[in-house]
Image (cartoon, rainbow, N blue to C red):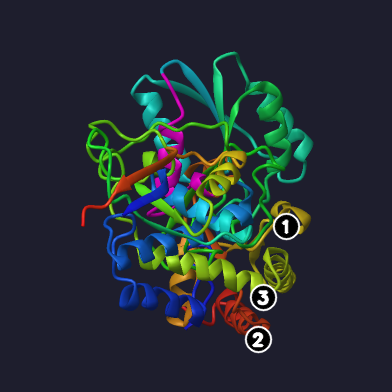
Amino acid sequence: MIYLDNAATSYPKPESVINAALYAMRDAGGNSGRGSHKSAIKAGELVYNVREKAAELFGCESERVIFTLNCTMSLNMAIKGSVKKGDHVIISSLEHNSVLRPVHRLSEEGIITYSVARVNPLSDDETLKNFASLIKKETSLIISSAVSNVFGTILPVSRLGGLCRKRKIRFIVDGAQAAGMREINMKQSNIDILCLPGHKGLMGIMGTGLLLFSENTDIEPLIQGGTGSFSLIKTQPEIYPDRLESGTLNLPGIVSVGEGIDFIKREGGTSAVYQKEKSLTDMLFGELANVRNTVLYPMFSGKNASGIVSFNIKGQHSEKVGQMLSDAGFAVRAGYHCSYLAHKVYGTDKTGVVRISPGYFTTKKELKSLIFYLNKIAMGKIL
Amino acid sequence: MTHTYIKFESQTLGEKAKRLLNDKGIKSMLKRNPNPNHKEGCNFALFIQGNVWQAYDIIMNSNIRNLGVESYRERL
């Protein structure tokens, strides 16, 4: 199989990541923060190592790194822990359902109202204007992806952060398709809350997510429970990370994320990963343009795109093309990518798109092989 | 025997302090607090190899939240 679905989860994982997860299971069996025995203390040290690494990579304090199960959980915690009755929320037109659905649910419950700001992939100025025009006095929150999971569009996160800071609006960023592949600095970009998966660009194993937030941001906890601290008090602790981290942590997963961050550093850092993946997607985009009957989305290419190339073959549903590619040994993602808004707003809701997302271990030879098969499919030689 | 240590509400805060002190050449060891406050329950104690008050000043200057210096006498 040639794996080209790294936007869903990165694969393969570096050997060092696998070994780190195994180490946590085999040699550090205690429950972090829960007990005075050495293995519990050791587990807590391992978890803290990863807090420090994530804090350094994204620019926040280590105790404001919260471990979750995935980016969706982080986003739910961030969104629902931020709003109060009567608030107005603005989200971008490229948001994943992990943003749209919690926001929509809050609006159905009569807690908030929300607006969708159209992203113009060719003009950051216009995108900024679209967001600014929707702000009203009740607007308490703006949510934007850093990179679209459907088209790879890079959103102007730093400029949106500046807008939010100026208008005193909390800013949440969904970094699912950016973490580990693009530089994100919360302080520099005025990001109040950053939600991330641990298992995509950060190379960790599945079942890992992160929620990072700035010093002046407080988040109401969605769940309460044991934290290994304040055990004789009935209420949830006020201190972080305990306030937002009830229950046993996924130690092997967290340790794997830490090793993933180290792997990225050893390979030259986030910008080196980005350059490598960008060269692959640029090549792919160029080659796809020569495949007969292919519909590319050129407005999402060039400087404003990252890590993802989406396309269709005229007259065929994306799912059918995805299945044919699967039969030929290629793992791509077809359909709607859990992104109602992106497909609806940009007119791909009838067919979906075929999404190709190369990863750090993808080779140009593999992409050429994909193009070879796509040519056959486009010419009707594979049915 | 009397033990003196700096008390933290969580392992995270204790680890943060421990690493800060280590960077400044002060060795310490983080353990569960052997003498927890009976109103609050579990917390953590950072045992300092050296002058506990010097370590405490460093921690305070770095704004790492803590519950102060505490001593308890171990029953033999």
The answer to which image quadrant residue A320 occupies is bottom left
Residue assigned mark 1:
A301
Residue assigned mark 3:
A267
| Amino acid type for the residue under numbered disc 1 | Ser
Query: Is residue A56 rendered to the left or right of residue A188?
Result: left
- Indicate which disc, 3 or 2, sits on the residue closer to the N terminus: 3
Residue A158 showing in the rendered view: yes
The front one of A335 and A268 is: A268
Kindly identify the residue that appears in the image at 36 percent across and 51 percent down.
B3
Residue assigned mark 2:
A365
- Indicate which disc, 1 or 3, sits on the residue closer to the N terminus: 3
What is the chain identity of the residue bearing mark 3?
A
- Which of discs 1 and 3 lies nearer the camera? The answer is 3
Under tag 2, what secondary structure? helix
Asked if A71 appears above or below A327 in the picture, the reply is above
The front one of A88 and A3 is: A88
Label 1 – label 3 distance at C-alpha = 26 Å
Asked if badge 3 and badge 2 are on a common chain, one would say yes
Asked if residue A76 lies in the magenta stretch, the reply is yes
Asked if A280 appears above or below B18 in the picture, the reply is below
Query: Is residue B15 rendered to the left or right of residue A249?
Result: right
What is the chain identity of the residue bearing mark 2?
A
Horizontal and vertical percent for residue A118? 63, 35
- Indicate which disc, 1 or 2, sits on the residue closer to the N terminus: 1
Residue range (magenta): A62-84
| Amino acid type for the residue under numbered disc 3 | Glu
Horizontal and vertical percent for residue A192? 58, 36
